[in-house]
Every structure is written in C-alpha cells, then in structure tokens.
Image (cartoon, rainbow, N blue to C red):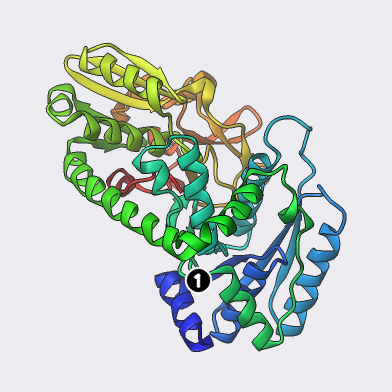
Amino acid sequence: MPVIDLSALFLKGLGAAQTAPLGLAVSGGGDSMAMLYLAHQSGLLFQVATVDHGLREGAAAEARMVADVCARLGVLHQTLEWRGWDGQGNIQDTARRARRKLLADWAAQKSLRHIALAHTADDLAEGLLMRLARGAGLDGLAAMQPTWPEAGVAWHRPLLGATRQTLRDYLVASGGVWADDPSNDSDRFERVRVRKALRVLAPLGINASKLAEVSSHLRDARAALDAVTDMASTLFVPHRGTVRFAIAEFAAQPTEIQRRLLQRVLMWISPGDYGPRGGALQRLRLSLVGHQSATLAGCRFVVKNGVVLVFRELKAAGAPVAQNMLWDGRWRIEGPIVDGATIGALTALGLAQIPDWRASGVARAALLSSPALWVGPRLIAAPCADFGEEWSANAYPGPQGLNSCTLSH
C-alpha cells in the first residue's frame, strides 16, 4: 500500500483525535513503530509511552530504543514500568490489563484524553479465530472496536485497516527501525498458534484481510442491534451517577435488547474490560422482570414500586486515589487542588458530616458509594450530595455513555 494511502488511513482512523493532544502506546514492535513514524510524518501533536512489563530480557532495551527514536524526532517519551506479575493466571491478559491502567494513568497525568494503539487487520483476524474457537456469540466475534471510552480516556485503533506486512513495508521504505518480540514465535501463547494456523488457511483464501472483512460485517450487525438499544435506552433516567428505569418499560423490550440495556448500565456504573455474560446476566434480567432486587458486578439494582434504582455497591467501590486521578474507573472531581487530598467513597463517615444530604434527592445507599474529596478523615467535598460548592464530580463517560455500546473492545 502506498505511503500516502497509509497516512490517510491512519488519520481517518484517528478521527477527531488527530486535532487533540494525543498519546501513542509504542512498544517498539513493527506495528507501533510504524504508528509513531506516521504520527510524526502527519504533524500531529502527541506524546509517547512505552510499557516495560519486566517479563523478558530485552524489554528495557526496546523501551530505550523507542526513547532514542522519539528524542531524534523531538517527541516527548516516557517509559512506564510494571512489575506486578505474580506467576498466576493468564500472563498475556494480566499484562494487557496492567498496560491499559498504566497508560490511562499516564494520560491523566499528561492531560491527554486520547490514546492510539497500533492493532492491525492481523489482530482482528487472530481475535476472530480465537473467539470462534470459544464458541463466542455476535458481540464476541465482532470484538475489537475502532474506538471506545475506558478509564477516562478515548482509545483508538487507527490502523485496523492495515496489515502487519503493510506496516513493515512502510517502515523499510521510510528507513524506520523496530524490534521483534521473540515471544511472538512461542507456541505456548494461543495467539501465536492462531497466527500459524492462518498461514495454513491462506491457500483457501482465509487470510487476515478476509477475516478482517468478516469482522467488519459482524460489527455492522452489532451496530444495528446497538441502534435499537439506543432508542430503548431513553427509558434510563440518570441522576448523579445513578440510573432509574421503570420495570414495565424495560420488560416490554425484546429479550436481547433487555440484555444489552443491562450491559450498558453495568458498564457505565462499574466500568471494566468486559461486562457480565451468560447466566449471571440472565439471572439479573429475570430478577428485575420479577420485581426482585439484585446485585451484579459491583452494582446494586434496588426495586421499589415498579422502579429500579441502580448504583455502585459500596464494598465494590475503588480504593482512594490522588485528587488528580480517575477514581473507581469513571469519576473525576474538578475544582481547587487541596494538599494531601484524595478521592474515595463518601461512606457513612462522610455522610455524617453533611447534615442536609437528603436535599440532594439521592438515596442514602447510593450516596455512600459516591465520589468524595478527603484530607484524612475530614470531608472536603461530596458533589453528589451538594457539599463543597467549589468542586464538581464528573463521570466519564457522562450520561450519554448510556446511549453508546461498551460491550466489548
């Protein structure tokens, strides 16, 4: 693919993010290094972060290589180190989650609201085959969104229309450098085994480009269902981080739309990589239709007089963080910076310091898990309870997030 076309593809994939301060996640591999050179060539305003997981020899050297290239290009660069692997579970999934958190925290510190990742058509194809092997449904097979909100950041994959080989050809033509991760050849990883299987399937016409095209068709089908869910989501009434809806209106929706509506509420109030699936979501749906309260994924669904009130479960709320950080995966408190202040749940201790909290119109149980600004045991602000007029609490995404699908990314 000609360089000019690849540049146009990259900018189109970024959309509005190309005109905003942008963060690039650059590992040093061919895909992300191509993205770095494309961003520089396009004259974008951006900074770069490299995550060193400390899991293999050579990772630190690759981070230094990225730093050296950025220095030559006049681009700000920072290496983010993670040493949290305890030897348990899926190493690739654990590292991915840690990487996202490190990048989101870095973006917050640098006032960057957009981060670009260098996933390609090959990643789409490999992901489709892996999910197919697990018997995934439509949402799983149509995974890997071009853009989505998470942890206070808008994430972008502007290179999904390019193949891995196209990016390496661009690097060679541009005189760019990159490093190859030796773990990409290890059969102990599922993605590597799938990558090799694709080479066997290629003579049948089943290649990365074709599977990426199939994935695109599936995303179109999912988009159609999302559009119906958008219309149905008008039954939601958001209020200071909580959501209300009438059971009768909810029960009138088709079963699949009910499921998607619940996913949206869950992912808005309790953000995560993936929402609940299968049996747990079905049990929640049946409980609500049967006018029974329930709890799922850190969210409480309280039923009273035919209305459901949904809010964050206090015991599931996030640990306190510094005032300038995103709390509980979605809240920021904006206002004057206070030395030593942290953001955490309001709890009963804070509520006791607000004599007129009932005037807020928010249920007591919901206020307990709402965001509050603290200095030690002293409450500074609790915006959802109208305490501390100099500060405001903003959920990310805002209430409009209930009208956009976050089922998978």
Q: Is residue 46 visible?
A: no
Q: Residue at x 56, y 78 (%)?
A: 45
Quadrant in the rendering for residue 188: top right
Quadrant in the rendering for residue 88: top right
- Please name whichever residue, 124 or 57, is drawn nearer the observer in this view of the structure: 124
| Callout 1 secondary element | loop
Left or right side of 302 for 369: right
Q: Is the residue 2 above or below the residue 54 in the image?
A: below
Left or right side of 250 for 174: right
Q: Residue at x 48, y 72 (%)?
A: 20
Mark 1 neighbour class, 10 Å CA radius: few under 14, some 14 to 19, many 20 or more: many
Q: x%, y% of residue 176?
A: 71, 82
Left or right side of 4 for 177: right
Q: Is the residue 229 above or below the residue 9 in the image?
A: above
Q: x%, y% of residue 173?
A: 65, 88
Q: Residue at x 31, y 45 (%)?
A: 399
Residue wearing tag 1 = 162
Q: x%, y% of residue 28?
A: 72, 67
